[in-house]
Each structure stands twice: as structure tokens, then as C-alpha cells.
Image: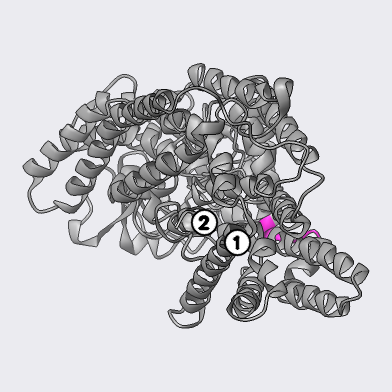
Amino acid sequence: MKALLPAVLVAVFALGCGTVPWGATALGTAVALASLVLISLLGLPAWRDPWGLGSVGRWLPVLAAALVLASWWVSPVRRAGLLIVLLLPAIYLLPAAAARCWQDRWERRVGQRGLAAAVVAVASWSLFDHYVLGSPRVGMPLGHHLLVAEWLVLLLPLAVLGVREPGFGRWLSVTAAALGAAAVALTRSVSGGVALAVELTVAAVALRRRGSRWPLVVGATVVALAPMASRWAGLTAGQDTSLLARLGFWRAGWTGIVERPWLGWGPVSGSWTFGLHQRPVPGINPASEVVADLHSVPLQAVYELGWVAPLVLLAAMILALLRRRRSSDPAWTVAAVLCLAGFGVAALAGVFFGASALPVTAAVVFGAVFASPGSEATAVEAGGRPWSRHLVAASYVALVAWVAVPVLLAQRTYERAARDTEDGDRQLAWIERAAELDPDFPLYRFIVGDLLPDPAEQLDAARAAPGVAALWLGAGYAGADAGARWAGEALEHACAVDPMEALATFRRVRLAPEAPDAVGLAARALLAEPRLVASPFWRNHLELLAAAVERIQTVEGVDAGWRLALRQAVDRLPPREVGSEPDPTELADLIEGMDDGIDPVPSELIFRRAPWPADLAVEPVELRLAARIDLPPLSALPSTDPSVLSPETCARGMEPGTTGDRK
């Protein structure tokens, strides 16, 4: 049934291929591409002006698409945005396709029930996962609590529209309203809660004008915001760690925007480049944090595309809404506009994480605005013979297949390699095949270099993703072990994009312990990870260790008690004989890994691929000595001056009497 197609598309993306977990699979990517392209072709008859913008306004989306294409062309990480550029025509036509499915009142009624059912399914899943399966926070099926909040806010006004009707439709809408609002509240997302409150407030005003029991809606607003009371207290006191982390992300995004203001860093470039601008704050950002999103959709759009493209697109959307001020079904149109307004509020401090469920759902809701006839403008049906449109559709599908099939085959081959852990030769063959099919994808090339081993291949992969610290750390360690001349530079870059991580700096100390900056680098490594005092490396460099500890005593911005405790802990260590080797049974490893299951995995969040566990950097420590170092890393102390473990101190380490980059 045509009227259900948009709702089915929304549900498929929200429950499967458009989420963080399943969107990272080859099957999920294939389903997303096929369903999006095929359903968007329903809007092809209106290709001349699918948004109904008029003879002049219809060029605004075309200009925005051209700017996105230009941004992709000049991007330093062009491979990241390949599929998005390929899908620009589909995204352009999808609103018109949704509108064609909801042309009369009966079709809109069926479509509304489909959207309500999708809301019930997603909200029920999230609540079941939280209360029954024990997830600490409402976040499934999309994979993150902020994604769930944004997605529900984006659909709730349309989902509850059926309360006007008697029978099944009313109860379905009531269920969607109750479960959806509960799920948004339990995400404890302030941006989602504020967006829901905005939607409920506007609804209360509308209901009051109609003489309804609008106080019930106001009461629902209070109930929706009640679970966030603790968050509000932290926000007003300036102590909310989530907000403080966001401020750091936003500063990093602004730095990137200033560097490339007009065309940005390229579509979907964010997760591959954010590390170049990030300045983590001790006590707020953990070491080796995976930063895959700026936590502000508008800011991220400007970061990736530059100022011009988002403004042109926004102008086109506003013009489209203004030309639909009159409608034969005003309740439907107002609900659709309210959906977009609520999503706009949530997106101000929301996330994207590469989850395609959000933009696809937004495009469908945008198309719902066009669905009610009687407005000043509707999508203009293009003239010409049907066979010409069929030829265009077939050509576009062929282009998508030509570009996407090798990418999908490479992703599927990569997944086979990830599962085939028992046969090393076969695993290498699989991943080499994936790299042949998609040679510009850095993760495949990095793993090939790791398995061969080939440090130069790993370095090339890291250069293709300049802001991904994990690749630079792995390449630097591999190069250092192989004696490559570039290893020190790679390790320095790894530190610069993850400045609170310790092992990259410590490996540079081991590379050149006699270098002039060895003392400063050793001091920096110990500040980031004091357990490195127990490394067997110091048995041959006790004077360097002593000098590094003394250097730490002169560095400003470090808690005085922490500095004193480190010196006392080192002084109390049992003597180590110079040149001796420790008992291998008394060694343990400090490991910096990738996709180790402890934190969000780089493969899934940054590269949108299934996890590939690997040890990037390993440093042995003596257990009996490490047990005596009962100090947290300096990055965990809020009292630490952020400039101490900043990118500026990665090159030469800690200079005497300095606070990071302040002399």
C-alpha cells in the first residue's frame, strides 16, 4: 500500500539499517541504499521542482547540492563522504516521494497510523531494553540516548494526530504519545526534553484556542521534564559534565570552521578530522575519547560543508514552508511543521553519529508538509514522456550500483575477515581483498599493514584519516618497532590528536632517550600515566627518570599534592639494578587498544564498520612497582590546567617552569 511506504522506510531505518549498531554492517548499508533510492524515485515525476519553490526558488536546493559536491571535491578526506554525494539526488527527491504517497485524506490517515506504529515500536524497544534487559540508559534501537530523543521528537506531533479520530487510530496515537514521551523523558536528554516541551507548549496553545483541556498538556510537559530535574540543577550551577564536554566540542568545531569557512572539511568528514581541533579538558574528557560528533547538528553542518551550503538549504526549506501557509488539512500541516521545529530545537545540542535514521526521517516529515493540497505551491509535475523518466531512473540506479557495489562487497569481505580469527592467512587474504575493492578506505589498509606487518601501509592509512588518533598511534608504534625514520613524527601526531594519551609520548622517549627533549617528554608521559614509572625501560635510564620527576616538580598547573605524591612514590620504590632484566612472570602490559569493548569503538563510530579488536600500543610494567604507584592520571583531575596536557606540549614535552603552552 503506497500510503504506508514512507512509514515503512522510517521504521526500517529506525529499527535497523539507519542505527549505529546495524548501520555499520554491510547488510544494513545495502538495505539503506536500496530502500532510500527506490522509494525516492516515486518523486521523480516532480524532479523539476520537487519542493514546490517556484521558478526561481527551485534552484536553491540545486545550488545547495552543488556546494555540497564542491565541499566533497576539496575535502582532505574525500572517501568519507562518497556515499552521501552519491545519494544527493535521492535525498532531494525523497520529500516529494513522501508527499505523493499522502495526497488525499485517506492516505494521510493510513500514513499517520504507520508513523504512530513506528513510534510505538521504537519507544517500546527502548523502554524494554532499559527496564527488562538492564541497559543503564534508554538508547536502543538507534544506539544512543540522544538519537532516540531526537528521533521521537521528530515524529511525535504527527504520531499523535490520530487522537482526533474514533476507534483504533485514537488508541494507537494515545499509545504512541505515552510511550514516546516516556522514552524521551527517560533518555534524560535536556535538548530532547526542551524540544518536547516546545512541542507540548505549542499544542497547549492550539488546544486552548479550541476550548480543550489544555492544562492536561501543560501537566504532561511538567511530567516530561521531571526526570531531568537533576540535570537542570547541574546546568544552572555550571557543573553539568555533559554541557562542559559539549563546550569543548563546540570550541573544536569553531576552530575547524575558522580554518575552512566556505566549503568546510567535506561531508561526513567530522569523525575523521575532529581530532585535529580537539583540546580535551582534564576531569571532563577522558584520555583516548572517541570524538565522532560535535554534539550540535547545525554546528557540524557548518563544520563539514562551510557556511554557504547550510544557509542556502535553510533558505530553501523556509521558502517551502512559507509557500504552504494555506492547506486543506491544516492540522496535518501544522503537526508536520511542529515536528520539524521540535527537531530543530533538539538538534541544537544533538548528535548525529552517522545514524541515517535521522536525516531520512526528517526528509519524510518535510515531505509531509507538501502532502496537503490547497497551499500556494505544490511539487510541480515535470512534463515529457514516461519512458524518459524511466531512463533517468534506470541510469541513476545503475550509477548507484556501479559506485556502491564494490564498497558493499569490501565491507562484507571485511566482516568475514573480522570473524575469521583462527586462520591468519585466510584472514589476511580477506582483508587484502577488501582493501583492493575499496582502496581509499583507511581502516582496511591499516589492518592490512598490521597483519603483514607493513608499517608504511599503516602510515598511509593514518594519513588518509588525519584526525583519528588510533591509526596514528598504531602506525607510530609499528614504525618504531621497525626502525622507521618517520616513527617519531607519527607518534608526535598521535599525541597532538589525543593529547591526554601517554603511550605515544613514552614511545618517543624510548626511541631517543639521549635526545635534548627526552626529559620533557618523559615528564609529560608520566603526567599522563604515572604507572609508567614501573617500566623496565628505566633500569637503563634511572638518571632520566629522576630528571623527569624533578621536571614535573617545576611544572605549573599541576596539583601540588599530586606532584609531591609522585616524587615520594618514586623515592620509595625498591632499587633497580642498572642493566638488569626483570622477571618476565612479574610483568604486565599497559595496552592502548582499538575496539576493545571498554569504550565506544573507533571502527563503529568513526568508520561505520564492525569492530576489529587490536592492540595498538603495548608497554610492559613491573607489577610489584606499579602496585606502589597509587596515583590517577593527571587527565582525571579537574584541578589540572588544560594547557599542561595540550597539543602544544606534544612536540618537546614539559619545559621547566611552564604551564603547557604558557611560558
Is 290 on the left or on the right of 342, as rendered?
Answer: left
Camera-nearest residue between 197 and 448: 197
Q: Nearer the viewer, residue 363 or 102?
A: 102
Residue at 51% x, 48% y: name it: 353
Tell me the chief SS of the magenta region.
loop
Residue 360 in sight in this render: yes
Return the residue at label 2: 3
Q: Which residue is mark 1?
A: 106
Separation of marks 1 and 2 at Cα, in angstroms: 9 Å
Label 2 sits on a secondary structure element that is helix
Residue type, numbered disc 2 = Ala
At 52% from the left and 37% from the top, the residue drawn is 43
Label 1 element class: helix
In the rendered image, residue 583, in percent from the top left (x then y), is placed at 20, 57
Q: Taking 199 as reference, is 94 left or right?
A: left
Q: Are marks 1 and 2 in contact (CB under 8 Å)?
A: yes
Three-letter code, disc 1: Trp
Q: Residue at x 73, y 20 (%)?
A: 56
Residue at the farthest front position: 385
Quadrant in which the C terminus is drawn: top right
Instruction: Tell me the magenta residue range.
Output: 238-242
Q: Residues within 10 Å of mark 1 (few under 14, many from 20)?
A: few
* Disc ID at residue 324: none
Q: Tell us which disc is closer to us: 1 or 2.
A: 1
User: If you read the primary sequence from the N terminus, does the residue marked by circle 1 or circle 2 appear first?
Assistant: 2
Q: Indicate the position of residue 434 as horizontal and vertical percent values.
A: 21, 35
Closer-to-camera residue (438/295): 438
